[in-house]
Image (spheres, coloured by chain):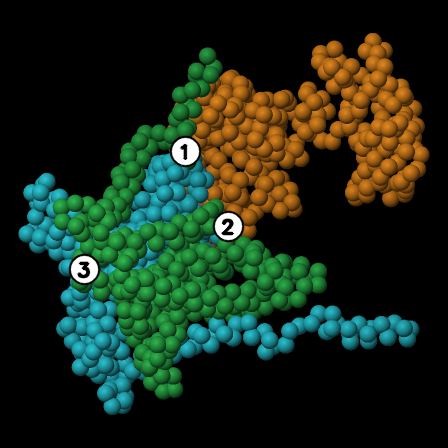
Chain colours: A orange, B cyan, C green
Amino acid sequence: MAFLTLTDISKYFGGVAAVERFNLDVEKGEFVSFLGPSGCGKTTTLRMIAGFELPSSGTILLDSEDVTYKAPNQRNVGMVFQSYALFPNLTVGQNIGFGLQVRKENEAVIKARVDEMLGLIHLEQHQNKYPYQLSGGQQQRVALARALAIQPRVLLLDEPLSALDAKIRVELRLEIRRIQQALGITTVYVTHDQEEALSLSDRVVVMSQGRMEQVGTPFEIYNYPRTQFVAQFVGQLNLLPITGLDLAAETCLLAGQTVQFEHHQSRQLSEAPRLAIRPEEFRLGALEGCNVLSGRVETVMFLGAVVRLRVEVGGLLFSADLFNERNITPPRVGEQIEISFPVHACWLT
Amino acid sequence: MSSKQNFAVNEKRDAPQARPAPLPWRHWLGVGPFFLFAFLFIFLPSLSLFIGAFQDASGAFTLKNFADLSRPEIVDAYWVTIRISLVTAVGGGLLGFAMAYGVTLGGLPAWVRTALSTFSGVASNFAGVPLAFAFIATLGRTGMVTLILKLVFGLNLYDKGFSLYSFWGLSLTYLYFQFPLMVLIITPALDGLRREWREAAENLGATSWTYWRRVALPILTPSILGAMILLFGNAFGAYATALSLTGGFINLVTIVIGSQIKGDILHNVGLGYAMAFGMVIIMATMMTLYYLLRRRSERWLRP
Amino acid sequence: MAAAMSFLPNLRNLFFPPASSQAKDRGSKRGASWFWMAVGVLYFVLPLVATFDFSLRARKGVLSFLAYERVFKDPAFWKTFIFSLEMAFFTILVSLLLVVPTAYWIRLRLPKLRVIVEFISMLPFVIPAIVLVFGFIRVFSGAPFFLTNTSFGTNVLLVAGYTVLALPYMFRAVDTGLAAIDVRSLTEAAQSLGAGWGTILFKIIFPNLRVAILSGAFLTLATVIGEFTIASFLVGINAFGPYMSLIGQNKTYESSSLAIISFMLTWAFMGLLQFLNRGQASSSLAGAH
């Protein structure tokens, strides 16, 4: 039996569905991310687990206990907020110890736990500082320690990194993962940043307009998106109109050139199916056993590790990302090129 | 080679032209009138009172004026003024806080908030002579509330020792502009209480009461005290309301100073200056306190 | 079925903001809020009702607007009111001319003066009006000014005194106005497009400060129009405040009608201020009591 179970959770705000029929099992020690654009219901779902919102229908089971309507201060669930939400009138140490003090733990226990938490986040020397004296990254680490100090059954993180600088974000991301694995704590993480979700999680829940689009490992989500929304929201995707579709032969025409694809029977096709290819699947030149297109380079954008081309094939434009290599000069604008991609790398939607 | 040198020289010569830094005296021209005004109409009058407080009738240096401040009627004037300021600051502060709480966190509908902010703007500025008239029509001997209490409830306020023209009557009148002022000052502070703090506290197991005791009240305390200090100062310097209400029969510092300006009732103008100087000292102390409290709460609440 | 199930929690959300999720103490909290609101409203309304009622009783036995009629027919009413309006006008003009360039300049070129200018603009809070006018008389009645000898002189002093009173909130209004429009970038943008200082001030800065300036002006108007303390010592019953006070000593019903008129004026000025400040942090704090 799963450790945290959400069954048929729905939430309406004034008749508008914020979350609809949300079902999820989270195993003990698992790291699950809710990924989606703003307004997709991911934060609302998280807040229902924390108890700040009550579901319009459905149940939430935590460690076999029904907590659906339990007050937030009875749940023993740790939460980290986007805006840190540190108490400005308390020091770092007092913030971390707050939850234990509320539980009337004795002073020695509190002190020991605070020290332990400070060690965990590497902020031992800042114990007596006030939140305003810390940087954003430090504040968020304190918020994490504060949530963990109560030894919560589940750790909830609501876009914890989105208020921080890019560099700190990556640093803290690694640290969150390290701490989560060290403690083996069940974690639900809300984000709109796919890189965060993919790099941190055991499983990712992609959400859109209050509904779950797909649940799976980061590998599955990225490589086998089950809906067009997932395919487009996670990673870059070329969606190209096709003609001359032959499902039996698994071929179609792309701007007059024949393309071979892999088709799974289970996949539902839309009215006017399009061919989906990720930009990074392209290779320069005509490779053996691959689909080969010839086209004209429209733009070349040098991004560092990647060179992004816009290639025009018979009036169709698509993006192709080539790995940068020092000894290979990227094509020039206007150049006529041949470009290849593997058969298994493209699919119909 | 030589062209390079030329270029360097040119660059040096051109630099000041490209970025014309205004001359220092022009810098000061923009703020000159302000400082001149402040010197003439704030600094000079204050300094003159300050000097006057140290002079006797013939203009010689003396400390007697300050010694005279301990005369019973003067001490009494200060004491009454401080008490009335304190009572109305605390009373107005509490009522204003309760109302501001109602519209920010107390769950009252949004239109109440809009109405309250308009009304507070008006009422906090409705003071002086007309306010005194309004309270005479309300709580004076033949005032509406006095009559209603007498005719409907059989309660004769004036028989019970109440008088509008006394300490408590004046306090009730001051409250009319004090509590709306509190609403105006404290509402932003209540808005500054972030929802996440409450949620974080609840999340960590705190009850509503614990949250208020450990987080919300400590955060608000500097703002509340600061606001009450402003209220205190507001009542402390009030003159027109008290004068028109009591006709000068209540012994407030402002009233004594006012009579001193009209005629030499203290038989000693230097004592008048010393009293005025004493007011400034008290107000300055209050404002310093206010400043320190505000800095503290701003430091905490900096985003 | 699903719609019906979601109905109740919806209502709950409508009435109880999700700030607190503890349902049990919300009802009593709202009850208490309404109670204190009622106390405040009663405190606010009762004196107005009483005064209005009183002002209608000038004619024995019937309710009439006789007291208002008498007030409006009194030439002294109009004379003093117009005088105070004029004084308010000059006060606003002088404060703007002092405050706007100063606030602008310390933002742009002399940020190190900010502390001093802010300090000075807060000083009127420390110096009560009665003390200020006491000092004015001591300084300006003698040599070399002799300002109290002529009515022009006392008018100048009155405007100066009001300007001092208005300084804190005028400065705050203008300064927050400037903060909101990022003067530095606007000025630099205008300069880079070739504008001179005159163009910058009158075409860019002043128009963008319109709301701030107008709110400062209305606040000044509301406090100055019936001001008593300074006016009574400098210009006596030439001004509206002392005139009201005089009426109060002699005529009972007229004084009530004056209180109502004065209240309507305050309401009008503050209403305009609120209207201007829609959606902005209001700076309607003044104090000349």
* Mark 1, secondary structure of its residue: loop
Q: Viewer-nearest of labels 1 and 3?
A: 3
Q: CA distance from mark 2 to mark 1?
A: 24 Å
Depth check, front residue: A288 or C99: C99
- Which residue corresponds to the image point at 67% horizontal and 24% vertical from the top-left? A229
Mark 2 neighbour density, 10 Å: few (under 14) some (14–19) many (20 or more): few
State the residue position of label 2: B303
Q: Report the amino acid beneath label 3.
A: Lys
Compared to A19, does B95 lie above or below?
A: below
Q: Position of residue A19 (x, y in %)?
A: 53, 24
State the residue position of label 1: C17
Q: Are marks 1 and 3 in contact (CB under 8 Å)?
A: no
- Which residue corresponds to the image point at 55% horizontal and 48% vertical from the top-left? A136
State the residue position of label 3: C251
Q: Is residue A93 left or right of residue C25?
A: right
Q: Is residue A153 visible?
A: no
